[in-house]
Structure formats: C-alpha cells, structure tokens
Amino acid sequence: MTVPLTVSPIAPGGVEEAGESLWHGAWKRLRRSPMAIIGATIVLLFVLVAVLAPVLAPYEPASSEWTSLSTPTFVQGPTSEHLLGIDRWGSDMLTQLLFGARQSLIIGVVSTLIGLFAGAALGALAGGLGGWVDTVVMRFVDIMLSIPSLLLAISIAAALGKSSYALMIAIGVAQVPIFARLLRGSMLSQSKSDYVLAANALGLRRRTIIMNHVLPNSLGPTIVQATLNLATAIIEVAALSFLGLGQSDPAVAEWGRMIVSGQDRFLIAPWLSFYPGICIAVTALGFTLFGEALREALDPKQRR
Amino acid sequence: MTTRSTMQEDPTAGSEPPRTDPLLRVRDLSVTFQRRGQEATAAVSEVSFDVRSGQHVGLVGESGSGKSVTSLAIMGLLPDRGVRVGGTVEYEGRDLLAMKAADKNAIRGRQIAMVFQDPMTSLNPVINVGLQIAEVIERHRDKSRGEATEMAVDLLHRVGIPDADRRVHEYPHQLSGGMRQRVLIAIALACEPRLLIADEPTTALDVTIQAQILELLKELVADTGTALILITHDLGVVAGLCDEVHVMYSGRVVESAARRPLFASPRHPYTGGLLASIPRLDSPRGEPLQPIPGSPTDTLPWDEGNCAFAPRCGNRIERCTEDTPRLQDAGERSLRCFNPLHGGSRQGTGDGAR
C-alpha cells in the first residue's frame, strides 16, 4: 500500500477531478439526498419494468384467455396464478400493468422532450435576441398559456385523431409555453449578471456571449422543470386515455384506459381501477421527488 | 504577452496619430440617468482628462462620486435606455461614443480592457477558467482553440497562479478570491490591450491579497507598457501606482495633479480630507482618525449655484454657497475650489473636522 506524499487540498483525485463543474457538484449533493434516492429508485424501477415488461410478465398481454373470470357479477381477485387477479377483459392484471408502463414511459418522455426542445428554442430565441422577437414570441406563448394545458392537449389530441403520436404531440405542445417562459426568464436575469457585463467589456460577440455564458447558466431550472413535467405528462397521458383520446388499439395496455374499463365493475371489483391508479400515482410521485431533489441540488442558494 | 506587436496586428488603428496625442482623451464627459416620469440625475459631468500611452492615471473618490460610471461610459457598457452620455471619449483620435457598436466591440477587449471590482461574480461559474481566457484570444487574435488554450496556460502562469496546467481546467468556484482576480487580470491582459481600466480591483479582497494583486498589476502594466486607469477610493493604492490623479466628488473632478504635488500638498479640502483620514504609521498612538464629516448624501447638486462639497467642507466661505466653482488651473494642477487649502497643509477639513 502506498501513501501519496503530496495531496492537493483542492483536487484530491488529481487532474481528472480538477474540473468539477456545477453539474458534478449537483450530482454529489443528489447522492446524499434521501428524497433523490427514493425518487430515483421509483423512476429506475418504472423504466426497468417498461423495458423488461415482456420478460417480467407472467402471461401474454391482452390474451383475454380468462373472460369467464370477469363477468358483470364476478371478477376474479388475486390468486396464486394471477397475483393481481384478472382485468376487465379477461387478461392477467399484472401483465397488463407491466405493459401499461411502456405506454406511459414512451408517451411521457417523448412529449416532455417535444415540449422541452420546442419551448427551450422559443425561450432562447426570445431571451437571446430580445427586442421585437422577444415581444412576438412571448405574446404567442402568453396566448398558449391562457388556455388551460389539459384543455389544449385535449383539443390537439381530438384534432389529430386517436393514436399514441397524437398524444405525444398534444401533451408536448401543451408544455411548450412553460419551458419557453422559464428559459427566457432565467436568460434575462443572467444577462444582468456581472460576468455577462465582463464578457461585454471583452468585446466578445453577441452569439458567443449568449451561447457560452447566458444559456449554460440558464439551463438548470429548465432541466428541473423537465423532470417535474414528466410526472405531469404521465398523468396527462392517463387523463387523455381516460377520456378516450389515446391509443385506439384495445390490445395495447394503457393505465388511464384501464381505469376507465374498470368503472362498470367498480362496485364488485374496485381493484380493477385501483391498481392502475396506484401505478400512475407512484410513478408521478417518483418523478416529482427526483425533480424536487434535483432542483435543490442545483439551487445555488443551497450550496455551501 | 512577450512581444508588443499591437500596431502591426491591429486593423482598427487606422492612421498612426501624432506622437504627442494622448491615447485616450476624455472631454466634458457627462452621464445622466433619466427614468420616465422622474427628474434626470446627473451622475457624471464635465469630466475631462487625458491618458497618454503607458501612463497610469488614478480616478479617486468615495462611493457615488461617479468613478465607476465614468469607466462604464468610456467602455460603452452603460445600458442604452434611460442613460444619456454627453461629451467625447477619443481613443487614438476616434470618438468611442459616436462609434458603431461593432467597431466598439472590436476595440473592447483588444485595445481597451477592464478588470472589474468583484472577482466572485465577474467569472462565468459554469465554464472553466481556461476557456474564459481562450475565448477572448480566439475572438480578437484569430487563434485556434488549441493555441488559445496554450496561451491561457501561459497567461495564468504569468499572473502568478501556481500549477497553471491544472488550474486552466478548473472552475471559478474552485479558486480563491485572489486567484479569481488574477484570472480576471489574465483575461483582461490576454490580448495585450493598450489601455487597462481597473475598477476598484482590490476592494473585494482582503488586505494581504490586495497588496499582492496591486503589485502584480503594477508589474504587468510596466512590462507591457499598458496605460492604466485605476479607479479606487483608496489614496494609498493610487500613491503606489499612478502618475497622475484626478479626485472626483459627486460626479465632477475637483482636483487633478501629478502624484507628488497632490500627496505633498493637497489643495482641495476634499482631497485634504481623504488624505487626513488615512491612518498613518508615524502618527502618535491613540490619536483618533480624522474623518470627513457627513456622508456623500449631504452633497448639494453642483449646478444650483453652490459647491457640492460645501455642506461638508471646513474651509467653506460665503461664496461656496452662492456660486458654482469651475475647474481652474492653479500652477501645476487643476482645482475646483474658491477657498483652497494652502500648500503643505494636511489639515483637510479644517475646523469642521475637529
């Protein structure tokens, strides 16, 4: 065993660790936060389930093999063969739930990415260029914001027809104004900072100042918002499916639609709606916890 | 940083001005802040001074005397809205105030650079210091990222940062205040500017570091022949660094002189007061410091027929509250006072201070 003779107090790991950035520091703080760990565990579990659904599921999805076990007067509850019982259409409940995670994950992530990129582009345009571009973009965003986001998503989904893609676009577009406003706001406040003044004093080009100085310092809140928005998106996927605006193929399991399908047997078998409901709530909670922890880890006021 | 090749490389210099012309000529600079529905506030007015090539000029005054606003006006960094800048600021014969934004941008950082007051906030927290130095070199000197980064290491070494090879990859929060100020100086001097404006470069640092940074600044500007405008409230800093000093009060210059005559015999009561308020090693133990009575808020507006300093001045005579003094030549200095102190006196504020 060798003992290093000289240890720099600033970078114990040597050259590799010398460059500890804002994100690196945030990562360290995240690992110490119980909220982050719980949130991350739920998120990770959710992603694993979604990806490995075909492996984990005990039966084929949407098999409808046990239709006799789901009638208006009797629904099979948990047994050793069907751990969570039988669903409304006579398939294994657990299998349906596992496959349902896929829809929520894909639509949730894709729609949030659509919202993030489109919103961030608009926000960066407004915050970076300012002037009349800012005015035009922000008035447009204000108009979008004046429509409740779920209502906006419903109208878009209804207009685009019943498909997963329609859901992604609808939920994504509804998120655009949130990201646009957030990024523009933080870019404007960063533009007033001393280092931007210093960059101006160096005669740097406007493009350089915006891309290298203003934008990277403004992204934190937007990334956090994206994590939090994933939770909202997953709930909205369920909400739109609940309203019958989602995936039209009945063979594709979706949590929101499973809640609806359980409704007519709610009095005799409340778990038909209860299980998918729990799945939605827990997943959303996971993303929210993780997002909140990330926000705290990135918050400059909480540091040191 | 080793060779002075500014003149050949510089596309903006144009025709070489006659040698006697100053590098920077500020004439009647005025800055007025105007917010809608409110009366305009004159932050700076009638400020005129020259900076010759390689000369070190000090702008001295307490908070609110308009020093920083003067420097921002010279750099063209004041916001467009709500600010009116008057007068002329000629750099090598070209008026910076009348110049197009793109031309001014080519001069900033290349010909005229600035070191700011607070090293804790003047560096971008999310990119490493090497990149922040390289960025300026890339912008003004047409170098590739690799060359610029190599030069950044060299610069860090020159400003006295140990282990520059490693530090170049570090982020601002990993450096101490003094280190960060060194980095800011490295950035400012990266393109070998001909004029450096240092706006209170040491106020945010503790005393031992202050001395180090000043020494470094002094060495670097001497090495490169850079002209310096040093903005400070600390006459001690000026004494060690500047050839010529302009003392400002409430937005106007009240006394301008070369360093020696100014310190040997301050004539304006305000300058006298500033000097008298510095603790001296040779003064008897236990002797109280002599502050200037009142605060900058006791100032009167200059243009209402009085001297702005009159309410705090121990040498006040009747005329001080009846007429606005003008800046006049008084031997080897300029002075804005009706009843100046007599040479050799250090009793700044006279009776009022005792």
Image (tube, grey):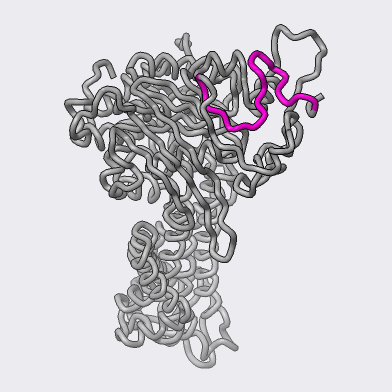
Q: Is residue A278 above or below residue A242?
A: above
Q: What stretch is highlighted in magenta?
A: B332-351
Looking at the rendered structure, the number of numbered marks drawn on it comes to 0
Is residue B350 shown in magenta?
A: yes
- x 35%, y 87%: residue: A158
Q: Which of B321 and A162 is in front in this view?
A: B321
Toward which corner of the image does residue A199 lie, by quadrant? top left
Q: Can residue A45 be seen in this view?
A: no
In the image, residue B198 sits, relative to residue A34, either above or below, namely above
Q: In this view, does A297 lie to the left or right of A251?
A: right
Is residue B42 or residue A301 the one in the foreground? B42
Q: Nearer the viewer, residue A156 or B303?
A: B303
Identify the residue at horizontal 47%, vertical 11% (top origin). A6
Image point 30% across, 80% down: which residue? A163
Q: Please name the residue shown 60% across and 24% down the image.
A: B234
x and y, in percent, of residue B225 in the image: 33, 18
Q: Is the magenta stretch mostly helix, strand or loop?
A: loop
- Image quarter hosting the C terminus of chain A: top right
Regarding residue B95, the answer to whether it shows in the image is yes
Residue at far bottom of view: A72
Give the x, y percent position of residue B165. Answer: 34, 20
